């Protein structure tokens, strides 16, 4: 007679945790060949490594236990291919989510780290790499309305617009004049999204920084205009306002750090 193995011995042989073997047994998915003393002691046959491979392989593919149990009774090459096709779709969706998660982390870390090293008092010309962006629809404002009023419909419609608001959100002004005259009313919102359909092109930009809540730039627009005049730079726009530090990393809204980038020509 073959020497049967305890759950501990079979666990060591198979590499499957004892608790997992007991759980699979309780669900009727993979059971020992023999039991002693009212099911308390389980005895496994070493040859059960073969049927166990069916369960462990499908578990590795994240197949639900209920599905494994159903397939165990009526398995066939055709059903297995159907199962794999379905799992592939699910895994591709998970991979898409993971890639998006990675892109959000990478994008935000880059901005926050850059903000840690800037001289907030300085205005000057700086080369900036291309940034892919997703541009929202043109904002419409009634008298007295600010960016908050325009942001609300964007939040509601973001899924239909394929705009992920977990990426950093910025304000887009079509000209320097609109930035100076209506800083709380950007014509558009955009997100910094690596797969965005538009781009802030690489090149030299007139750059300034300001700490404060959204749409509050103090005298920064005037200081940037003065710098441009003093250095014979034509600030043509558009203006991109990117928040390096926002509510994601700072609790005090008055400490948000904005970077204002204006396209220029000399």
Image: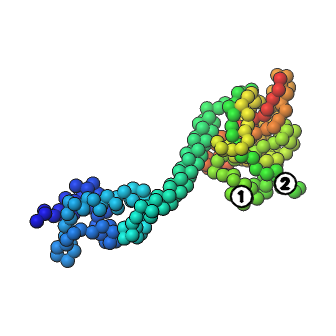
Q: Which residue is drawn at 75% across and 30% down?
A: 205
- Mark 1 and mark 2: Cα distance apart in space: 18 Å
Residue at disc 1, secondary structure:
helix
| Left or right, residue 85 beside residue 257 | left
Q: Earlier in the sequence, mark 1 or mark 2?
A: 2
Discs 1/2, front? 1
Q: The C terminus appears in which quarter of the rendering?
A: top right
Q: Which residue is drawn at 24% across and 62% down?
A: 48
Colour setup of the view: rainbow
* Residue on which disc 2 sits: 140
* Residue on which disc 1 sits: 160
Snapshot quadrant of residue 258: top right
Q: Is residue 49 above or below residue 207?
A: below
For label 1, the crowd category at 10 Å Cα-Cα, with few meaning under 14, some 14 to 19 and many 20 or more, is few
Residue 211 visible in the shown view: no
Q: Is residue 12 above or below residue 172?
A: below
Is residue 107 or residue 220 the one in the foreground? 107
Residue 202 visible in the shown view: yes
Snapshot quadrant of residue 120: top right
Snapshot quadrant of residue 62: bottom left
Percent x, y of residue 213? 72, 47
Q: Which residue is drawn at 30% across and 61% down?
A: 52
């Amino acid at each position: 007679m073959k020497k049967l193995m305890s759950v501990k011995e079979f666990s060591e042989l198979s590499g499957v945790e004892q608790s997992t073997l007991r759980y699979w047994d309780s669900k009727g998915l993979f059971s020992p060949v023999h039991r002693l003393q009212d099911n308390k002691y389980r005895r496994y046959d070493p040859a059960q490594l073969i049927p166990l491979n069916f369960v462990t392989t499908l578990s590795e593919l994240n197949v639900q236990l209920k599905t494994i149990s159903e397939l165990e009774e009526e398995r066939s090459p055709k059903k297995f291919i159907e199962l794999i096709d379905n799992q592939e779709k699910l895994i591709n969706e998970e991979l898409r989510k993971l890639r998006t998660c990675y892109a959000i982390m990478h994008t935000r870390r880059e901005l926050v780290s850059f903000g840690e090293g800037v001289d907030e008092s300085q205005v000057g010309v700086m080369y900036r790499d291309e940034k892919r962006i997703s541009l929202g629809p043109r904002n419409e404002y009634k008298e007295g309305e600010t960016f908050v009023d325009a942001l609300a419909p964007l939040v509601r419609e973001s899924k239909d617009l394929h705009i992920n608001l977990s990426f950093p959100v910025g304000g887009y002004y079509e000209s320097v004049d609109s930035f100076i005259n209506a800083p709380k009313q950007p014509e558009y919102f955009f997100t910094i999204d690596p797969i965005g359909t538009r781009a802030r092109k690489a090149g030299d930009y007139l750059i300034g920084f300001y700490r404060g809540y959204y749409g509050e730039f103090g005298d920064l627009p005037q200081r940037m205009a003065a710098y441009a005049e003093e250095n014979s730079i034509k600030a043509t726009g558009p203006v991109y306002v990117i928040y390096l530090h926002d509510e994601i990393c700072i609790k005090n809204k008055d400490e948000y750090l904005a970077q204002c980038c204006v396209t220029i020509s000399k």
